[in-house]
C-alpha cells in the first residue's frame, strides 16, 4: 500500500523545474566540490612530501600516494566538464592500458633520461601514458622499473609527476568553482544545458557510467574467462589497490545516486539493500588484488561482487532514471 | 510416388537448389534488427511501406546487417565486441553459415559485400596490435575466411562498397580492447580517417580532417548511386562543444560540409548514430538517438535549409526509391511509401536500417 501511495504521489507530483536546480545545487555542494577539494588537497600534499625526499619507499610518500589515489577514485565517475578539458582525467588516470603503453613509455623515458622532467611545467607536455597515478605506481611499486636508470632521475621524475598531478587537480577544482557550478545551476539559460533536466541527467549519467566502468573494467578485466582468468590485469595490483578501488568507486557512484534520489523512501531503501548485498559480497573476498579469480571456487565470489555492482547499475537505470524523468532510450544508451 | 517436398530435397542434395533470391524472400526493401518484448532478438525484412515481411530469430543482440547483392542472404553481426556473425537465409530463416572471428580479432558490427557478391568484408579489431583489420570471407565456400588486410587505421566501424568496386572504411580512431569492456583507451591520441581500399587491400586514398577535429570519430557511412560518400561522426571531445557531424566526400576531392547551423548540431549532442544518402546524392539524413532527432539536409552548401525532425530514440535510417525511412527504439517505422508511421509495440528497432 505504501508503495502504491509513493507511486501515486510520483504521478501527480512530478519533480518540478526549480526542484531540479535545487537538486543540482545540493549535489554540487555536497558531492562534487568536497570530493574535488579532497583531490586537490591530497595531491598537493603528495607533491610536497615528494619534494622533500628522494626515498620512494618512505612511509609518508606511500601513505600520501594512497590518500591521493583514493581521492581520485572518489571522483573518477565525474567525467564531464572540468575533468575533460585538455584531457585532464586521462592525464591523471591512464587506465586500462592493455597494450602496456605506460611501462613502455616509462622505460624509454628513464633509459634515455628524457629532459622533459627538468622544469615541472614541461611535464604537461609529456606523453599522457607517463602521467598520473598509474605511472607513479610503477615508480613506487614495480621492481623492474625501479631498477632502471639512475636514482636521481627517478626521484626527479616522481617529483615532476606529483607536481603535474597536483596542478591538474587544482585546475579541475578551480574550473568547478565558480564557473562550472554556475553553468550547471543556470541550466535552462545556457547553451550547454538547455533545460534544467539536462543538468540532472548529467549527474545521472555520471552515476551510471561509474557503476558500469567498475563492473565492465575494474572487475571484468581480472575475471577474464573461466578458462583464462587474468589476475595480472587487475587495476593497480602493484600497489595492492584493486579491490579498494572497486569499493571506493562503487561507494562514490552510490553516494551520487542516493543524493539524486533523495526524498524518495523506496529508492533509498532499495539502495540500502543493494549496498548491503555489495558490501557483504566484498567482505567474502580474500585477495585485495583479485587473486581469487584463479581458483574456481573463490572465483565465484568475485563474480558475485560483479553481479552486485550490476544490480546497482540496473536499479539506477530502471528505478532512479524514471523517478528523475531522465530515462535513456534503447539506442541512446548504446553508443555505437 | 515422389512428394514435392522429397523432390525438392533431392534437388538440393544434388546441388540443384533453385537460387534463393530476394524476390523469393518477399522482396524486402531493407533489413533491421530488433529486440522483442520477450527479450529475444530478431532480424526483420521490411517492405518499402514499412511492413514487416519476415522475422528471423537471432542468437544475441544484433548491431547491423549486411545484405548480399543478389542472394537472400543477410549477415547479422553481434554488437561489438562481438566474436561471431550469422548468415541467415531470408527465405526460410535457416542459418546458412556462422562466422567466427579468428583468435585475436573481434567484429565491430558492420560488413559489406563486393559488387558481384563473391566476397564479404568485415570490420575487425586486431586488439593486441591496436589496429583495424578487414576480414575477407568467401561466399562461394560457405563463408570461409580467406584472408584479411589492414583497414588503414584504428577502430574501423562501418564499411561500404563503392559503385567502382572499391571499399570505403570509417576508421573511427578509437582503440578498445575486449578485456577493457567498451572503455575507450586512446581518446587524447585518437586519429580517425576515411580510408579507400581496393578489395585486395591496397590503400587507395586516406582522408583526415583538420587536427582540431581529431576527436571527431568518423564512424558511419553511406554511398550514393554515383559513389558520393556521406559520413556521420561522433564527437569524443568535451561535451557541449559544437562541431560538424556530417560531411560528404568523393575520392580525389575535398570533404564538403553541408550548411548546418551550430544550433542544429547542438541538438544532435555530438552524436550521429546512423547516416544515409539518397541515390542521386543530393540529400542526406543523419540520426541522433541521443538528441532524438533526424537531420535532413541537401548535401551541397547553400542548397536549402536543413530540417530537424524529433523522434524519440531514433536511429536507423536509409533512402530508397520509396523515399526516406527511419526506425526508432520505440518500435516506429516512419517514412517510405506509408502515409502514416507504422508502430510495432513489440519491437525495439536497433541501430541500423540496411537497404537491400
Image (spheres, coloured by chain):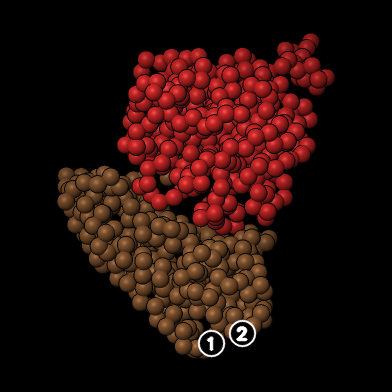
Alpha-carbon distance for marks 2 and 1? 8 Å
Say whether residue A228 is visible.
yes
Say whether residue B57 is visible.
no
Q: Residue B352: give x, y in percent of width and height.
A: 51, 32
Whether B147 is drawn above or below A254: the answer is above
Q: Residue A113: give x, y in percent of width and height.
A: 63, 75
Whether A169 is drawn above or below A327: the answer is below
Q: Which residue is mark 2?
A: A151
Please say if the residues under marks 2 and 1 sit with CB atoms less than 8 Å apart.
yes
Count of labels shown?
A: 2
* Residue nearest the observer in this picture, A214 or B280: B280
Whether A154 is drawn above or below B182: the answer is below
Whether A287 is drawn above or below B331: the answer is below
Q: Colour of chain A?
A: brown
* Disc 2 packing (10 Å; few <14; some 14–19; many ≥20): some
Q: Which chain is red?
A: B
Q: Which residue is mark 1?
A: A54
Numbered circle sitting on residue B171: none
Residue, x 65% and y 31% (percent of image)?
B167
Q: Are marks 2 and 1 on the same chain?
A: yes
Residue, x 63% and y 80% (percent of image)?
A146
Q: Secondary structure at mark 1?
A: loop
* Residue nearest the observer in this picture, B92 or A105: A105
Q: Earlier in the sequence, mark 2 or mark 1?
A: 1
Q: Give the chain letter at badge 2.
A: A
Q: Residue A259: give x, y in percent of width and height.
A: 27, 62
Q: Residue B111: give x, y in percent of width and height.
A: 63, 34
Residue, x 65% and y 69% (percent of image)?
A108
Classify residue A102 as left or right of residue A15: right
Amino acid at each position: 500500500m505504501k508503495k502504491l501511495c509513493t507511486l501515486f504521489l510520483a504521478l501527480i507530483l512530478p519533480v518540478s523545474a526549480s526542484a531540479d536546480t535545487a537538486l543540482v545545487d545540493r549535489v554540487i555542494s555536497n558531492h562534487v566540490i568536497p570530493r574535488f577539494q579532497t583531490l586537490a588537497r591530497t595531491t598537493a600534499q603528495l607533491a610536497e612530501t615528494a619534494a622533500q625526499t628522494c626515498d620512494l619507499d618512505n612511509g609518508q610518500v606511500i601513505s600520501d600516494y594512497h590518500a591521493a589515489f583514493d581521492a581520485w577514485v572518489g571522483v573518477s565517475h565525474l567525467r564531464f566538464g572540468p575533468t575533460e578539458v585538455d584531457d585532464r582525467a586521462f592525464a591523471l588516470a591512464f587506465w586500462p592500458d592493455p597494450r602496456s603503453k605506460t611501462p613502455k613509455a616509462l622505460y624509454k623515458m628513464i633509459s634515455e633520461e628524457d629532459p622533459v622532467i627538468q622544469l615541472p611545467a614541461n611535464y604537461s607536455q609529456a606523453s599522457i601514458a607517463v602521467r598520473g597515478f598509474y605511472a607513479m605506481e610503477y615508480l613506487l611499486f614495480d621492481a623492474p622499473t625501479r631498477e632502471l636508470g639512475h636514482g636521481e632521475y627517478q626521484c626527479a621524475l616522481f617529483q615532476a609527476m606529483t607536481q603535474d598531478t597536483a596542478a591538474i587537480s587544482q585546475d579541475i577544482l578551480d574550473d568547478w568553482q565558480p564557473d562550472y557550478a554556475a553553468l550547471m545551476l543556470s541550466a535552462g539559460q545556457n547553451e550547454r544545458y538547455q533545460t534544467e533536466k539536462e543538468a540532472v541527467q548529467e549527474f545521472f549519467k555520471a552515476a551510471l557510467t561509474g557503476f558500469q566502468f567498475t563492473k565492465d573494467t575494474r572487475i571484468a578485466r581480472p575475471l577474464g574467462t573461466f578458462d583464462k582468468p587474468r589476475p595480472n590485469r587487475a587495476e593497480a595490483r602493484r600497489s595492492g589497490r584493486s579491490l579498494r578501488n572497486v569499493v571506493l568507486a562503487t561507494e562514490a557512484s552510490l553516494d551520487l545516486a542516493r543524493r539524486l534520489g533523495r526524498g524518495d523512501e523506496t529508492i533509498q531503501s532499495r539502495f540500502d539493500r543493494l549496498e548491503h548485498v555489495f558490501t557483504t559480497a566484498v567482505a567474502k573476498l580474500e585477495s585485495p588484488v583479485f587473486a581469487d579469480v584463479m581458483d574456481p571456487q573463490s572465483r565465484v565470489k568475485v563474480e558475485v561482487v560483479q553481479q552486485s555492482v550490476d544490480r546497482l547499475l540496473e536499479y539506477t537505470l530502471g528505478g532512479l532514471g524514471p523517478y528523475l524523468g531522465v530515462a535513456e532510450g534503447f539506442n541512446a544508451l548504446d553508443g555505437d | 510416388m515422389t512428394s514435392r517436398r522429397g523432390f525438392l530435397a533431392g534437388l538440393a542434395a544434388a546441388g540443384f537448389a533453385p537460387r534463393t533470391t530476394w524476390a523469393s524472400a518477399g522482396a524486402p526493401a531493407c533489413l533491421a534488427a530488433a529486440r522483442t518484448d520477450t527479450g529475444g532478438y530478431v532480424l526483420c525484412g521490411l517492405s518499402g511501406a514499412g511492413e514487416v515481411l519476415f522475422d528471423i530469430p537471432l542468437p544475441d543482440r544484433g548491431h547491423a546487417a549486411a545484405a548480399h547483392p543478389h542472394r537472400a542472404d543477410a549477415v547479422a553481426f553481434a554488437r561489438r565486441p562481438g566474436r561471431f556473425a550469422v548468415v541467415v537465409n531470408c527465405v526460410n530463416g535457416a542459418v546458412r553459415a556462422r562466422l567466427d572471428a579468428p583468435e585475436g580479432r573481434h567484429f565491430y558490427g558492420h560488413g559489406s559485400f563486393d559488387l558481384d557478391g563473391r566476397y564479404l568484408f568485415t570490420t575487425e579489431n586486431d586488439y593486441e596490435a591496436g589496429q583495424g583489420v578487414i576480414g575477407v570471407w568467401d561466399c562461394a565456400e560457405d563463408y570461409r575466411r580467406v584472408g584479411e588486410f589492414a583497414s588503414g587505421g584504428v577502430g574501423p566501424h562501418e564499411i561500404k562498397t563503392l559503385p567502382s568496386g572499391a571499399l570505403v572504411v570509417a576508421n573511427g580512431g578509437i582503440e578498445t580492447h575486449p578485456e577493457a569492456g567498451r572503455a575507450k583507451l586512446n581518446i587524447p591520441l585518437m586519429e580517425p580517417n576515411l580510408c579507400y581500399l581496393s578489395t585486395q587491400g591496397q590503400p587507395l586514398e586516406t582522408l583526415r580532417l583538420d587536427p582540431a577535429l581529431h576527436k571527431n570519430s568518423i564512424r558511419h557511412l553511406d554511398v550514393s548511386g554515383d559513389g558520393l560518400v556521406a559520413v556521420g561522426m561522433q564527437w569524443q571531445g568535451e561535451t557541449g562543444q559544437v562541431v560538424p557531424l556530417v560531411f560528404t566526400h568523393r575520392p580525389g576531392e575535398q570533404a564538403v560540409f553541408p550548411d548546418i547551423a551550430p544550433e542544429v548540431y547542438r541538438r544532435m549532442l555530438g552524436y550521429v548514430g546512423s547516416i544515409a544518402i539518397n541515390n542521386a546524392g543530393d540529400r542526406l539524413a543523419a540520426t541522433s538517438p541521443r538528441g532524438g532527432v533526424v537531420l535532413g539536409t541537401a548535401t551541397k552548401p547553400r542548397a536549402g535549409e536543413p530540417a530537424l525532425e524529433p523522434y524519440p530514440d531514433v536511429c536507423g535510417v536509409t533512402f530508397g526509391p520509396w523515399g526516406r525511412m527511419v526506425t526508432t527504439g520505440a518500435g516506429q517505422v516512419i517514412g517510405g511509401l506509408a502515409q502514416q508511421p507504422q508502430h510495432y509495440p513489440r519491437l525495439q528497432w536497433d541501430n541500423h536500417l540496411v537497404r537491400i
